Image: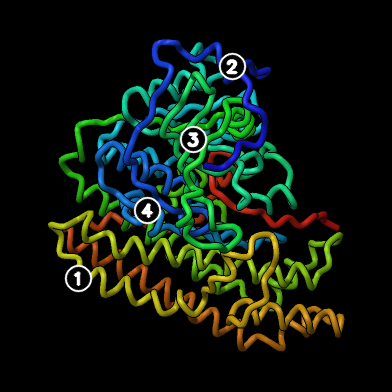
Amino acid sequence: MATPIGSDISAMDSEKGNSSQVSQENTFGYIEDVPYVWQEVNGYCMSAALSMVLQGMGLDLDLYDLAAAMGTGFSALYLGIDETRMFYPGILIRQPEYFDFFSEIYEVDLAVYLDSSTDFGRGADYAYERANLDYIDFSNSTMDPFEVLRESIDAGIPLAVSVDPYYLPPDDYDVIRQYLAPLTENGIGHAITIVGYNHTSHEVYIQDPGVGVLDNRGYPDDGRWNYTMSYFDFNRAWESSGYYTLRLTPGSGPVEDFEEKLGDFICNRLRGDRTMYFTGYENFYFISAGKDAYSGMALDLTVDCIADYARYFTEVNKPDAILRMGHMFETFLTTQYYSYKGALESLPNILPEVNLQDFLDAANDALPHFEVLSHNASINSGVQVEFRDSLIFSTFEDIALEFDSSGNLEGSIALYQEELDEIGEHLFAIADSWDDAANALEEALNLPDDTTPLETSFPVIVGGSGILVLAVAIFLVKRRK
């Protein structure tokens, strides 16, 4: 067990989490034998936390089963305008809508809680309001967060919550305490699973999917993923993340038309149906989703686009901005690669009655191209940019070094246009694979061809409840000229 950060005290100063507000009906609750799920990759924490909850409920869905069943492995987005040239893997795009879709097709009751009176909770409140999704706001409710925790544990169901990793006791999070501050309104939280509480010792029992990820130590086979925190310290971490909570209770099982609904959802995610991705924001030209995320990124690997990106950074060393552009491209493509690969491996178990061979043949064509564009160091290096010999990073590193030496921005980029074109060819190949896979899945399920001309849209990508991932942000101070 890890040692909690602060002293274990029985009376807490914060209104939320006050030990006196926890019901005295039970003083101890603990759910044994909840399978531990390691998140493996930066960004998968909420999926891992939910997998522990679901398996604790008896629903056997692992990390990559959720990447398939929620569609995150088959979703992608590219945002390209001015100083923003960013590829986003599916796991980082409007997570609340994935949770809502999953609970609908599996008929699992999902209750979302947050506190809009906190800085972080305001971002969560905004995301749910924009997505027109139901939630319970602790600031307008008589329900206390610790009461929700106790009731879920007493019912025998683990609880998935978002916390500020800055306050978590494992030394795995020292890198966050070294480089970052506690969460702000647009920060990024981390998800953990609560499996018990002790109202006598004022502790909660935690299974943490994120240990071993940030510091690249790998799977925590020493058991440090299982630890306790005092009510006081846990409350600091929970409050800092807006008391964001996902409480699941068993429902009636998968819907009758489960295969059709999930298949149609995956087809539309692969194709990049803008209405499905971002209802109401279909006409924003600088956003590309699904297969078009890859082709959109490929089309922006030009002298003009990269030079425009660099020019917007007036307070940051421009070679460094170019270097980090390559780093983030590679980081998020690697994140996408593992979720996509895992989702492909899991989907036959999710849809056992469907002949997926043609779909898998088409979808697997993307894997060699993902592999070329990915590198493990990109997702393990945290706030430090770790230098590596990989196609994307090396290309942007060479551009940055040339520009630092010559001072000629356009000329430096042009020298490496051949390498940029090579990256683009792999991205176009992934786009073709996703399109072919969507067509094959549609045929396998005998779905109606309801595709419409694709238009661009605007995403709601928020650093509060919309993402809820374990990540170390790399911040660049930006100011337009």
Quadrant of residue 243 within the rendered picture = top right
Q: Residue under label 3, please give it.
A: 161
Do the CB atoms of the residues marked 2 and 4 lie less than 8 Å apart? Answer: no
Residue 440 sits above or below residue 425 on the image: above
Mark 3 and mark 2: span between their CA atoms? 18 Å
Q: Residues within 10 Å of mark 4 (few under 14, many from 20)?
A: many
User: Can you say whether 327 is above or below 396 in the image?
Assistant: above
Quadrant assignment, res 235: top right
In this view of the protein, can residue 117 be seen by the observer? Answer: yes
Query: Which dot marks residue 18?
Result: 2
Circle 2: is it few (<14), some (14-19), or many (20+) Cα within 10 Å? some
Cβ–Cβ below 8 Å for labels 3 and 1? no
Tag 3: amino acid: Val
Give the residue at x 20% y 40%.
254
- For numbered disc 2, what is the local secondary structure? loop
Rounded to the nearest angstrom, the CA distance separating label 3 from label 4 is 17 Å
Image point 74% across, 51% down: which residue? Answer: 178
User: Residue 211, position in %: x, y?
Assistant: 53, 52
Q: Nearer the viewer, residue 329 or 432?
A: 329
